[in-house]
Amino acid sequence: MPLVLICTNTALTSFSAGRTPVNESFFSGRLIVLLKFLGDKYIALAAGGLAALILLARQKKTSREGMTTFVQTALMSGGAIILITAAGGTFGGMLQQSGISARIAGLTKDYQMALIPLAFIVAAVVRTAQGSATVAVITSAGMLSGMATHGHLAYHPLYLGLAIGCGSKLVPWMNDAGFWVVCKISNLTEREALKTIAPMQTIMGVAGLIVLLIAARLLPLI
């Protein structure tokens, strides 16, 4: 349900962007407004949770008191994940506001060729520290944005962006929401997930860095 609602909102927003409004009936206009409201990610997730509770109550045919055990179990397992990932997102926001981009740009102004592995390492450190690959990419891009335009690079800035993407693969563990999604859906324990998911994504990121270093040398795109 959350996925359908969010995708519907995205489709309505995308198809209506930049187009001249057309005459529409009162009903269709209200329906679009309602779908966009329900498609908000917070509303959609809350609606999915409510639907899950209603479905559980119908399947178990139990009283309100009997539902307490199920709800408590879900909150106990999900609450820790929410707290860890929220703390990681907060840390990423603090890094963005710290002004570290200008400092790093000044320190590396004479080492342009080393920016690809540096971008990879920065993204990897941010990802490992705070968990979210998205936050790691955004934070690292903000930190390194001054480097891409500082002086003349020997290769296209696209390689820096790709290096940040490769670095954001390292190292998934318990502070990563995606780690928990794969762990729970695959019915893995935390130890099993750390032995499989983390090494797999680490190998992916390092292999990507090696390919980028070779490509930037042989095919600089400038």
Image: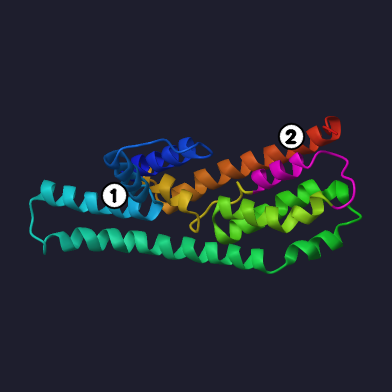
The residue positioned 63% from the left and 53% from the top of the image is 138
Coordinates of residue 142 in the picture (x, y in percent):
69, 56
Q: Which image quarter: residue 92?
A: bottom right
Please indicate whether residue 46 sits to the left or right of residue 173 in the image.
left
Figure colour scheme: rainbow
Q: Nearer the viewer, residue 9 or 19?
A: 19
Instruction: Count the labels in the image.
Output: 2
Q: Closer to the observer: label 1 or label 2?
A: 1
Give the numbered dot on residue 211.
2
40 with respect to 204 (left or right): left
- The residue drawn where x is 51% and y is 47% is 195
Could you tell me residue 143's position as x and y percent? Answer: 72, 58
Please tell me whether residue 115 is drawn above or below residue 213 in the rendered image.
Answer: below
For this rendering, which residue is in front, 94 or 114? 94
Q: Is residue 155 magenta?
A: yes
Crowd rating for badge 2 (residues with CA inside 10 Å; few <14, some 14–19, many 20+) = few
Q: Quadrant of residue 26?
A: top left
Extent of the magenta region: 150-167
- The residue under label 1 is 48
Amino acid type assigned to the residue bearing label 1 in the image:
Gly
Task: Tell me the residue at 38%/55% (across/down).
Answer: 42
